[in-house]
Image: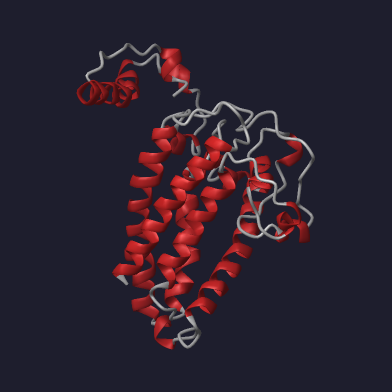
């Protein structure tokens, strides 16, 4: 099991390197900086910290107690299947669920607040897919991995399924100018999903598929015009800070107005101050001051 996790990690990191290279050589949106707005928030807080914390909650505090109480995994309902069959089954069924839940989030005001953070980035790239509200991840990954364990699947299915999710998530958000032709009717990619992240009214209720584009074509939500979006992100102001993004889903506020309070300013500028200090130590650079307007754009 451990060697499978090592292999999947190596594959994932290799895939990240390949996608970054493709973004550089064949950009969908030219001029997009690598260290774009919100890069460190997405990489450190969403990808590393949040993912690690929620993994403990989902597997150790939710799925494992459920299995110990009900003993579903002892029924071995899919144990006799070949591993590839188990992976295929859980990939397709979960993708079908994600399509409908994703569509529901765009129509329901309450659940939209658990999803809007994912649409807040105005510069979409390989890392943008990691920005998802903790509640959204908690719901979707519990529903994703609980059946794998409770139905008695082979333990290797979990890291394999997680790898497929990560690889596909990176791909559909990548800033790559892909021309997949008729394959886009079956396999989802940047062509349709970058439109889903566009700040265009006509696409707000379209392109909900994650892995298989045929859900959108089958259920009438596909949108693939012959031109590219003009802008991305939300049409309203959204906080830049990770914690404020979660608070914003509960209580609306103006991030800029909060800067009037000295205690908030200390918190707000703490992270960029630490980052400037770290850069100074590592690269021997003279720290620069960060004006309010500059801080609000990072």
Residue sitting at x 38%, y 75% = 155
Q: x, y percentage for residue 58?
A: 38, 61
Residue sitting at x 60%, y 69% = 93
Which residue is nearer to you in this view: 292 or 15? 15
Which residue is nearer to you in this view: 101 or 215? 215
Residue sitting at x 64%, y 29% = 235
The quadrant in which residue 71 appears is bottom left
- In the displayed structure, would residue 94 be above or below residue 253? below
Looking at the rendered structure, the number of numbered marks drawn on it comes to 0
- In the displayed structure, would residue 120 be above or below residue 168? above
Horizontal relation, residue 68 to residue 125: left or right: left
Q: Residue furthest left?
A: 281
Quadrant for the N terminus, please: bottom left
Quadrant for the C terminus, please: top left
Q: x, y percentage for residue 180?
A: 70, 51
Q: How is the image coloured?
A: secondary structure
Whether residue 285 can be seen here:
yes
Whether residue 61 can be seen here:
no
Residue sitting at x 61%, y 57% = 101
Which residue is nearer to you in this view: 191 or 244? 191
Q: x, y percentage for residue 19?
A: 51, 45
Q: Residue furthest front?
A: 25
Q: x, y percentage for residue 153?
A: 44, 79
- In the displayed structure, would residue 239 be above or below residue 45? above
């Amino acid at each position: 099991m451990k060697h499978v996790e090592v292999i999947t990690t190596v594959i994932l990191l290799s895939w990240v390197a390949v996608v970054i290279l493709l973004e550089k050589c064949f950009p969908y949106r030219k001029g997009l900086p690598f260290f774009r707005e919100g890069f460190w928030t997405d990489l450190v807080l969403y990808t590393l910290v949040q993912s690690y914390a929620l993994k403990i909650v989902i597997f150790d505090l939710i799925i494992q107690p459920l299995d110990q109480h009900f003993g579903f995994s002892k029924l071995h309902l899919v144990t006799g299947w070949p591993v590839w069959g188990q992976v295929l089954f859980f990939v397709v069924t979960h993708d079908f669920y994600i399509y409908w839940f994703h569509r529901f989030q765009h129509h329901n005001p309450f659940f939209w607040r658990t999803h809007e953070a994912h649409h807040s980035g105005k510069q979409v790239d390989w890392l943008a897919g990691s920005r998802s509200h903790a509640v959204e991840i908690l719901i979707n990954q519990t529903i994703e991995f609980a059946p794998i364990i409770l139905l008695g699947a082979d333990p290797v299915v979990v890291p394999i399924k997680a790898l497929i999710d990560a690889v596909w998530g990176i791909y559909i958000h990548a800033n790559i100018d892909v021309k997949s032709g008729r394959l886009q009717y079956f396999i989802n990619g940047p062509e349709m999903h970058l439109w889903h992240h566009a700040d265009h009214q006509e696409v707000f209720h379209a392109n909900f598929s994650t892995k298989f584009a045929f859900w959108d074509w089958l259920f009438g939500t596909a949108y693939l015009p012959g031109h590219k979006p003009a802008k991305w992100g939300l049409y309203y102001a959204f906080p830049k800070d990770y914690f404020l993004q979660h608070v914003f889903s509960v209580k609306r506020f103006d991030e800029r107005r909060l800067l009037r309070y000295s205690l908030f300013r200390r918190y707000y500028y703490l992270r960029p101050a630490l980052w400037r200090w770290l850069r100074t130590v590592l690269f021997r650079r003279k720290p620069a001051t960060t004006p309010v307007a500059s801080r609000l754009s990072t």
